[in-house]
Image (cartoon, rainbow, N blue to C red):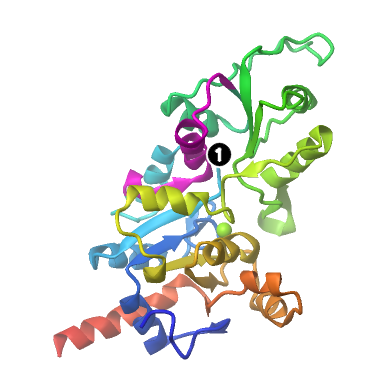
Amino acid sequence: MAGAFAFKGCQKIRGAQIRILLEAKDFFLFDCDGVIWHGENAITGAAKVVNALIRRGKNVVFVTNNSTRPRENYVNKFTRLGFTDVMLDQIFSSSYCSALYLRDVVKVRGQVFVIGCEGLRVELLEAGIPCVEEADDPDATIYNCALAPDVKAVLVGHDDKLTFLKLAKASCYLRDPECLFLATDNDPWHPLSGGRILPGSGSLTAALEVASGRKATVIGKPSRFMFECISSQFSGVDPAQCLMVGDRLETDMLFGSNCGLDTMLTLTGVSQIEEAQEYRSSDLTTNHSYVPDYVVDTIADFLPAFEEIEEQNDD
Ligand SMILES: [Mg+2]
């Protein structure tokens, strides 16, 4: 029975244990960066794993907090990196889910002020949500710039062209208590090569939370909303049949735990097994939600399990 394995509980699993888990689960949710790829480089073996799962009739979806590109770009990237069977409806990004939230949940009437990359605006526009045009005079300041009269939501995502003027405008819009305050995700930072990091959307949201004295509603992981999007697009999703695979304890594992899914940490990304063990031994029970049910070095560890299944089927 799913959830009753003796090998469950923040430990590395291998061989037959992975095979049993793969056979037990029907629905696989993968984070992308640090799990499937690092930037433009696929994790070795990841494409084979994903292709094999899809070919075996498992449901596979990708759940990413990255809001910078539209879903079409993801399909192209998957194809480019050798993931041949990935379709648009398998991709759940925080930008796409933000658009669904604005359109279907709060049914926003009016414009959205976006702090974010072009990909985020593309997703909103595709969902029919009008965004405030970004066409400031280079000399504009918060003292003299125009403010749109009908802004009903401020949405904050990753923005590598953030300016003080954008922050100031967003702060002004948030003075209106009717104006919603949303964040695509709350990621604090992202790793770059050479030990450098990139501040994440969470750091921009924090600036606006201080300026506005308000708390943003977070759409991406670890919030449950992305799982609700998945459940509404795939019929009969049973949390007990799902496995959430990710590389970050505070987003991916907590998301899985919040949604009642079994979780697997892969060690090809941000979090290390020692951090998971620290959370596990913490006296604070809320910290236990960050602890993965299973750990693998890489999702390529699934490959021998597929071979085992094939051998069994040949017998
Ligand atoms: Mg990741």
Residue at the farthest left position: 315
Disc 1 on helix, strand or loop? Answer: loop
Q: Which residue is depicted at the point 22% across and 86% down?
A: 311
User: Which segment did they paint magenta?
Assistant: 87-111
Q: Is 16 rendered above or below residue 80? A: below
Depth check, front residue: 59 or 247? 59
Q: Main secondary structure of the magenta part?
A: helix
Q: Residues within 10 Å of mark 1 (few under 14, many from 20)?
A: many
Q: Is 240 rendered above or below residue 67? A: below
Q: Quadrant of residue 314?
A: bottom left
Specify whether residue 69 is in view: no
Q: Is 247 rendered above or below residue 308? A: above
Report the side of 291 relative to 20 (left or right). right
Q: Which residue is depicted at the point 45% across and 86% down?
A: 14
Residue at the farthest front position: 178
Residue 41, image x, y percentages: 49, 56
Residue type at mark 1: give it.
Thr
Q: Which residue is depicted at the point 84% across and 12% down?
A: 143
Report the side of 221 relative to 238 (left or right). right
Residue 97, image x, y percentages: 48, 42
Q: Is residue 142 covered in magenta? A: no
Q: How many marks?
A: 1
Q: Is residue 95 covered in magenta? A: yes
Q: Which residue is depicted at the point 47% across and 39% down?
A: 96
Q: Quadrant of residue 268?
A: bottom right
**Circle 1 residue:** 68
Specify whether residue 147 is in view: yes
The answer to whether mark 1 is within 8 Å of ligand 1 is no
Q: Quadrant of ligand 1?
A: bottom right
In which quadrant of the rendered image does the N terminus lie? Answer: bottom left
In which quadrant of the rendered image does the C terminus lie? Answer: bottom left
Residue 278, image x, y percentages: 72, 78
